[in-house]
Image: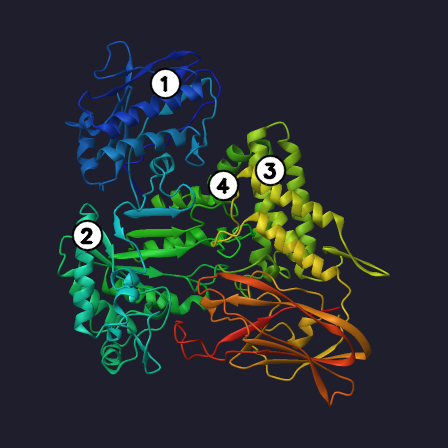
Amino acid sequence: MKKFLSVSILVLVLISGQTSAGQLVITEGSRPFYNIVVEETADSNTLSAASVLKESIFRMTGCWLQIEHLPAKKMKSLFIGSNWLQGKPVYQELLTLSGEGFYLHSENGNYYLAGKQSTGDLYAVYTMLESCGFLQFSAREAWYPPTFKLVLEEISQGYQPDFRFRHAHFPDKDSPGFCIPSKTHSMDDWGLFVHTFQKLCPPDLYFDQHPEYFSLVNNRRIRDGQLCLSNPAVISLLGDNLRKEMAGKPECEYWSVSQNDCINYCECEHCQALYDKYGSVSGAYIEMVNKIAREFPDKQISTLAYQFTRSAPKNIVPDPNVNIMFCSIECNRSQPLASDPRSRDFVRDMKDWAALTHNIFMWDYVVQFKTYTCPFPNFGVLQQNIQFFHQYSVPMMFQQGSGSSWSDFSEYKQSLIAHLLWDTGLDEPAFRQKFFNAFYGAAAPAMLKYFNMIQEEMNARADERHLDIYGYPVMYANWFLKPELLISYKALMDEAEGLVSRDPERLKRVLRQRCSVDFACLDVALNVNDPILSFYNQRNEGLEVNPEMTLLLDRFVENCKTTGILSIDENGYTPEQYRTQTLNIVSMALKPNKAALKSISSLTPYSPLYDVGGAKALTDGLFGGQHFRLNWLGYQGNDMELLFDFGHTETFSKLETNFFLDLVSWIFLPLQVKIEVSDDNQAFRQVYLQDIAELARNNGQKPVHFAFGFPETNARYMKLTAISRKTCPDWHRGAGQPSWIFLDEVVVE
């Protein structure tokens, strides 16, 4: 944020007494010394600014200021609106600011809050209020610090934002109750937003009659991919259908014509020629969007620089009304982009795009999407990354948080980001202290200690570990979520609860944040064999559930319910569903398992890409989690054939296990499962065979439980075979490519 003609800053005096020279006493006790003055013909923004100022001062002081249309002879004035500055030298300074800029100016005992445009009048009021300790936590919660004597210092200072467009994508992303006080924007000016090929050229309408419109991948046209951008008919169709969309929302300026959320770009010889011509796949996309943008010179046509189109092209420049939506989805979050060697390619791409255009919409990712309730200590990089984008003159910032859902420290994160997008030079430690004091009250010291501790633990190995936006707590169980650290974090949450036990609103905030710590404890206890934090207790007769963990599970679900946490990941997975899944795993783990820790070998090669220690992961007592990277053994493009050696003859009649299903990640259920047994590991006899029905194509991501029962059998050896489809089917976006099957713990009874 640029500041101009700085004379002094605003301060709040919380005690009565003599006022020094240069200070303006606004109220003292129940007595006002100022009126609020706004022009009678002012627009709704300016009138709203006056009402906000009146209401806010009352909440802080208990004193009502009158709103007038002309200054009173016996009262000093808080003038709102730029018209009151006309004729003064500072008015010319105001006119040099950007459209959302504003001035705070005092003169002859009066105080002026003036936006270049009327929105700036509101921003001026909220900036003045923040200097008095006010904070907007969310659309529904704000802090008005009580004071006996409200004093402002004289000032003459201009403000303008560091980014023209500012969006913090958290629960209050589109609410005026948060956006206006925090000076952020909603997405109301977008007619179509991101991944719009499927909207503008839907395969259900066009693929059967015009497969040539769609990507050629592995010598076949596929419906679930991108478009063939070397085909002139495709460009015409996109333009025609975009024009129809615009007719329904003529007021919108920004329209996305952009790739679908997958890879599978066209490999035909004509598209390949474009890639070669421009030195990057993105070149074909820029050529496409330039052609469309020329049909709509009064609109901004946006396209993605994302995954396979992230690198900038050569020999072509985006047209002036082409907006580049540049995305950081692959980047590590443990270190700042500019200094992290792992982000070197991303930094190069940022520089290359900035050399081509300044019409860039930066899409940055700032939460953990697979587990919103997992601790995610990326606060140390937020400011530096935002400063990095500002360095390259990026005008538009979209910080993707948890959308409509709560996530770890999301109240603080959305507020911090909003302030950084206005002023990249914000004193973040001071802002953090101010926010925590106001938000958590007496619990602030304990909450700050936790915040700083987990951030420091993450920083200690930030140069060697990857902080992933698609992570789970167990992935950090030997880093900042070690069991011994989690126990310390729980103790700090206990302390924080006790400090606000008689403050219901702040207690609720502590309990909400506690859900993040409790969730991490549950996930690590369930998926790591650590004696100091485990879901199970070992007894002579076997495992038994740790009652403290079931109580913690119940408390987590109840706290989520009472504090408004409805989902714990980006797909809407609920706390109740998590409890059900967890209890199912615990139930399976407690069953007497004749395969537990027994010899097991894989007769077909498993994939080394997701290392869980090989086939022994299927008998180690650790069950798979909600993602295929968590204790699941994967096979790519081949069948799974496992051999169990019980060490002696065993009697059994049932096998239970889970297969993982995630079609987006090319993970299918097996086509068939077969169980065979043997006494000598030579001659095998079949005891079970089942064909697996194919589930719906839009079934999400989940473990699928199977229980295979068969007549009681006596054998030392058992062979479990899962027949894979080996390649993705014709209807799938990965058609013809190797498919996967994933298996977790095998329980034999």
Residue 222 image point, x, y percent: 33, 74
Residue on which the image places disc 3: 445
Residue on which the image places disc 1: 26
Residue 536 image point, x, y percent: 75, 56
Q: Residue furthest right?
A: 540
Residue on which the image places disc 4: 432
Tell me the CA gap for discs 3 and 4: 12 Å
The amino acid marked with disc number 2 is: Met
Query: What secondary structure is marked by label 2?
Result: helix
The quadrant in which the C terminus is found is: bottom right
Query: What secondary structure is marked by label 3?
Result: helix
Mark found first going from the N terminus, 2 or 3: 2
Q: Nearer the viewer, mark 2 or mark 3?
A: 2
Mark found first going from the N terminus, 4 or 1: 1
Q: Report crowding for label 4: few under 14, some 14 to 19, many 20 or more residues within 10 A (C-alpha).
A: some
Q: Nearer the viewer, mark 1 or mark 3?
A: 3
Q: Which of 281 and 590 is in front in this view?
A: 590
The quadrant in which the N terminus is found is: top left
Residue 682 image point, x, y percent: 73, 90
Q: Report crowding for label 2: few under 14, some 14 to 19, many 20 or more residues within 10 A (C-alpha).
A: some
Tell me the CA gap for discs 2 and 3: 52 Å
Mark found first going from the N terminus, 3 or 4: 4
The amino acid marked with disc number 3 is: Pro
The amino acid marked with disc number 1 is: Ile
